[in-house]
Image (cartoon, rainbow, N blue to C red):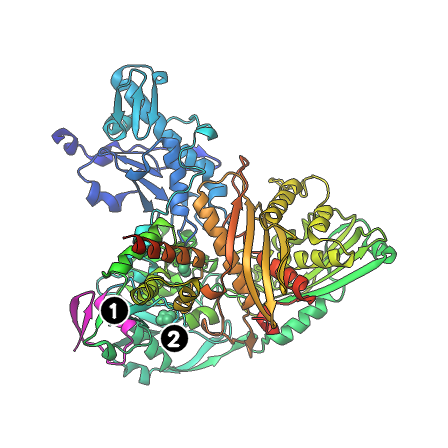
């Protein structure tokens, strides 16, 4: 049995310790907001926050996540909710499939760096592919969130 | 209320036939059965297949096309709501199952708005007319004194009744056959920017894509398929697979010889996707590689290039090309080579099926639920009505998900294990077993007279045809793969279009923009080359080459007008400030192309510094006739620019010994945020009929980039992707 802390809840699951965290979250725990797309750590769709750091959950064995705090797109964190707002306001998603991973990557960025430059945004988001090509809107939505944070 | 609740809902639902544009929308019962729980205490009014108004005023509209980022659930429904004068905040969308009663549901070819705009208007207008009649009867006044306004019917005296309050009367009325459509100047939603109706679900992680569908007792499956297209299993050994924790079963999948039939292979069924993947990797399979085992895309490219360097089959001839070439003061010749591409939508192909005896229910991210249904009907041999195809959201499609080979796999597995099964393709499966965009060689030759006028244009191309997927053995391009070359919008007296031989060795399928990718590329790059040959500015030269206002395709239904083509080009040039001073190493390039009945021009600005390319800015202008949702059109143009850049920079699928060499996003790369340019989009205001949006923005991007690189460096690149040249 492995116990995972996801979005503040505990889940005891019976899986092989080498199962990637992604599949434990999706197929065993049953939270499907975290997406599979490449399985080899190069697309970012599966990103979650593991003790506040963005990780590709397809690359982390579930055993390595035990005892750590996991936040998925379904979870709560100040920046995540603010970014979700901006995403809606600017109509960022097209098909929407990559967006959970994009939101997690952006959340991790703003958690560490509340006022990123465009280059810093690029750097933080480089691991996330959007096949629909919503990059411009993602960047605008991050900048909008930064500006709202500054005002408040 | 008591009385209302006692009335059986079904007893009121009318049998309705409504003819519209050849599509008969017959409806004997409500299509909203799975909403029944929510609305069981309400009475409801179903004037047609697409509209259900409930007595609490909530309005359910049916989306018959698939949502894959195209915004279609929002745009089609907003057309109904507009005609109906409904309040958008009261609208929810129900996705249609795959059923011929909805007409064609195949969501590709950039056709949804093109084909369904008028039908959707009628659906809304019919509902509105009946609500007006209901109000007039209730008040005992004439209908002329009543009008619909934001979910109310309002009488000239000022009294009003909410839509919901009229349901009971409206549902007893005959359905009118001819209804008045709104004047376009009164549109309320059409032509504005509506937010995607699914945006909350997308950002909260609650959106249900195919991969997210879960059923009680559902098993997960992965399939090992032959690395060579149409190869088959000789023998296999599952011993190691069965030792893996979570693996439940191993099943042989037959090859089904239909265009969208299963490829065949060995399926591993497990309690989770990971175990299915691991079990699949542990299989030992001996394959019979079959006829395509020698496919080598490099040799193949050489072969089709030879085929375009000799005379081909003539597809079109105007004037006398040989004379023109003989007399030409200048002759320019170029050869273009473009590789196969893979759709690679972020969501891999997948489907859930549950076969129970003689019935089957499917949940799949399909662009074409009717075709998925056909595949399953053919496999199970059951009547069509026993098969239900539920369409989930699609995590991208780009044409891949209109081919339902992955759906029938799920049904085969479910039947074998007698439980619901979700088949999941890995990314490697997706890239190695696709329906590839064609590979192409193109040869172009032009003559220019001493005044700098282009007098002859020969375009010869060889590419395996999409038709080969449907009729094995076809080895020449089909008519629909020729028209984007033969409808050349240039004022040239002598034109010849020829096709060369190109047999297929993989499944060829349509990918976003289809044949317009190779043709849009070669035509735009070659035209730019001709401008250079006569020492003219590419914009001025191109406008001259397009020439006077005329219709290019007088024989076809929808006119291709050169005036609209020139207009988008001029606007893009203006927006980009064409010809402006730029820093060292920077340059602009342009391209313009007509496809899916829409007109698109892009001007790009690139920099090439120390041999490295950057695309800094894209200005796109589209004329797609009347626009339903501006936000969607802009988003599609932005996405098209990135899609076009991905194929220009990195898009390349190759085969060796019959097997596809690429397998994931590390060797089939995509544009990422740091490479993405600023994208500016202008939509031409128009009242012409709506035309395609999802695809026509793609073909201009690669040639505009190549033309800009030429301007910046003096080097012309004829082949894609540009990664071949170390530029990216
Ligand atoms: S699925 Fe994990 S990075 Fe792509
Ligand atoms: S929105 Fe479709 S992949 Fe990003």
Whether residue A28 is in magenta: the answer is yes
Residue to which mark 1 is pinned: A25
Spatial distance from mark 1 to mark 2, Cα to Cα? 17 Å
Q: Residues within 10 Å of mark 2 (few under 14, many from 20)?
A: some
Task: Please indicate whether residue B583 sits to the left or right of residue B226 in the image.
Answer: right
Q: x and y percent of residue B385 in the render? A: 34, 49
Q: Is residue B277 visible?
A: yes
Q: Is residue B458 positioned above or below B691 on the image?
A: below
Residue to which mark 2 is pinned: A40
Quadrant location of residue A80? bottom left
Q: Quadrant of the C terminus of chain B?
A: bottom right
Residue at the location (27% across, 67% down)? A26
Nearer the N terminus, badge 1 or badge 2? 1
Q: x and y percent of residue B681 in the render? A: 52, 49
Disc 2 under 8 Å from ligand 1? The reply is yes
Task: Please tell me in which quarter of the rendered image ligand 2 is found.
Answer: bottom left
Q: Magenta region: which residues?
A: A1-30
């Amino acid at each position: 049995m492995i116990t995972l802390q996801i979005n503040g809840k505990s889940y005891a699951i019976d899986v092989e310790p080498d199962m990637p965290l992604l599949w434990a979250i999706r197929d065993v725990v049953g939270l499907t907001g975290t997406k599979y797309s490449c399985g080899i750590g190069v697309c970012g769709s599966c990103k979650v926050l593991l003790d506040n750091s963005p990780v590709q959950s397809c690359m982390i064995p579930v055993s390595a996540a035990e005892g750590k705090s996991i936040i998925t797109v379904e979870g709560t964190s100040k920046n995540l909710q603010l970014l979700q707002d901006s995403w809606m306001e600017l109509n960022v998603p097209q098909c929407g499939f990559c967006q959970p991973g994009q939101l997690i990557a952006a959340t991790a960025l703003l958690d560490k760096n509340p006022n990123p430059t465009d280059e810093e945004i690029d750097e933080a988001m480089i691991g996330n592919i959007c096949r629909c090509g919503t990059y411009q809107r993602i960047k605008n939505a991050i900048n909008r969130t930064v500006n709202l944070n500054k005002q408040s | 209320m008591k009385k209302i609740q006692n009335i059986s809902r079904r007893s009121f639902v009318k049998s309705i036939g409504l003819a519209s544009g050849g599509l008969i929308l017959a409806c004997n019962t409500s299509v909203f059965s799975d909403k029944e729980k929510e609305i069981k205490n309400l009475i409801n009014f179903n004037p047609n297949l697409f509209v259900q108004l409930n007595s609490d005023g909530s309005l359910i509209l049916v989306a018959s096309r698939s949502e894959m980022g195209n915004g279609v659930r929002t745009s089609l429904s907003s057309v109904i709501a507009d005609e109906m004068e409904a309040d958008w905040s009261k609208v929810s969308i129900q996705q249609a199952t795959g059923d011929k009663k909805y007409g064609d549901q195949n969501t590709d070819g950039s056709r949804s708005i093109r084909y369904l705009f008028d039908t959707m208007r009628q659906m809304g207008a019919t509902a509105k007319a009946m609500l007006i009649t209901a109000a007039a009867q209730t008040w005992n006044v004439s209908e002329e004194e009543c009008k619909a306004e934001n979910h109310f019917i309002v009488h000239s005296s000022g009294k009003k009744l909410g839509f919901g309050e009229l349901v009971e009367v409206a549902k007893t009325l005959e359905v009118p056959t001819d209804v008045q459509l709104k004047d376009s100047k009164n549109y309320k939603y059409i032509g504005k920017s509506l937010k995607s109706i699914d945006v909350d679900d997308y950002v909260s992680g609650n959106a249900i894509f195919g991969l997210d569908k879960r059923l009680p007792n559902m098993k997960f499956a992965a399939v090992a398929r032959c690395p060579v297209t149409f190869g088959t299993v000789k023998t296999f050994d599952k011993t190691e697979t069965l030792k893996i924790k979570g693996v439940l079963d191993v099943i042989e999948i037959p090859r089904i010889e239909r265009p969208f039939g299963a490829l065949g292979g060995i399926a591993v069924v497990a309690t989770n996707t990971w175990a299915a993947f691991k079990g699949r990797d542990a299989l030992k399979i001996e394959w019979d590689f079959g006829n395509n085992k020698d496919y080598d895309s490099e040799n193949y490219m050489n072969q089709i290039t030879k085929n375009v360097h000799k005379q081909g089959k003539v597809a079109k001839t105007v004037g006398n090309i040989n004379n023109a070439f003989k007399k030409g003061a200048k002759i320019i010749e170029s050869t273009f080579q473009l590789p196969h591409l893979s759709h690679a939508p972020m969501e891999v192909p997948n489907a859930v099926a549950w076969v129970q005896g003689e019935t089957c229910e499917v949940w799949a991210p399909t662009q074409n639920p009717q075709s998925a249904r056909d595949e399953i009907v053919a496999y199970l041999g059951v009547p069509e009505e026993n098969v239900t195809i539920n369409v989930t959201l699609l995590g991208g499609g780009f044409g891949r998900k209109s081919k339902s080979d992955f759906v029938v796999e799920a049904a085969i597995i479910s039947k074998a294990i007698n439980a619901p099964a979700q088949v999941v393709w890995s990314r490697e499966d997706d890239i190695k077993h696709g329906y590839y965009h064609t590979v192409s060689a193109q040869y172009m030759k032009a003559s220019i007279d001493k005044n700098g006028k282009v007098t002859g244009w020969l375009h010869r191309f060889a590419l395996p045809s999409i038709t080969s997927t449907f009729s094995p053995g076809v080895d020449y391009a089909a008519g629909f793969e020729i028209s984007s070359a033969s409808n050349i919008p240039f004022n040239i007296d002598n034109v010849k279009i020829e096709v060369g031989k190109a047999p297929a060795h993989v499944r060829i399928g349509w990918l976003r923009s289809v044949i317009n990718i190779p043709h849009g590329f070669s035509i735009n790059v070659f035209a730019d080359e001709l401008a250079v040959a006569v020492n003219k500015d590419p914009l001025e030269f191109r406008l001259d080459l397009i020439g006077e206002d005329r219709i290019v395709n007088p024989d076809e239904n929808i006119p291709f007008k050169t005036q609209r083509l020139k207009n988008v080009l001029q606007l893009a040039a203006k927006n980009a400030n064409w010809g402006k001073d730029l820093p060292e190493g920077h340059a602009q390039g342009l391209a313009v192309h007509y496809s899916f009945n829409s007109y698109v021009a892009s001007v790009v600005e690139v920099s090439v510094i120390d041999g490295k390319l950057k695309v800094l800015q894209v200005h796109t202008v589209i004329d797609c006739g009347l626009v339903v949702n501006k936000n969607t059109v802009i988003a599609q143009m932005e996405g098209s620019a990135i899609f076009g850049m991905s194929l220009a920079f990195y898009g390349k699928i190759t085969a060796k010994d019959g097997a596809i060499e690429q397998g994931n996003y590390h060797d089939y790369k995509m544009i990422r945020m740091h490479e993405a340019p600023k994208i500016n989009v202008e939509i031409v205001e128009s009242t012409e009929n709506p035309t395609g949006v999802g695809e026509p923005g793609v073909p201009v991007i690669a040639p505009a980039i190549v033309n800009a690189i030429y301007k910046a460096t003096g080097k012309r690149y004829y082949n894609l992707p540009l990664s071949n040249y170390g530029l990216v």
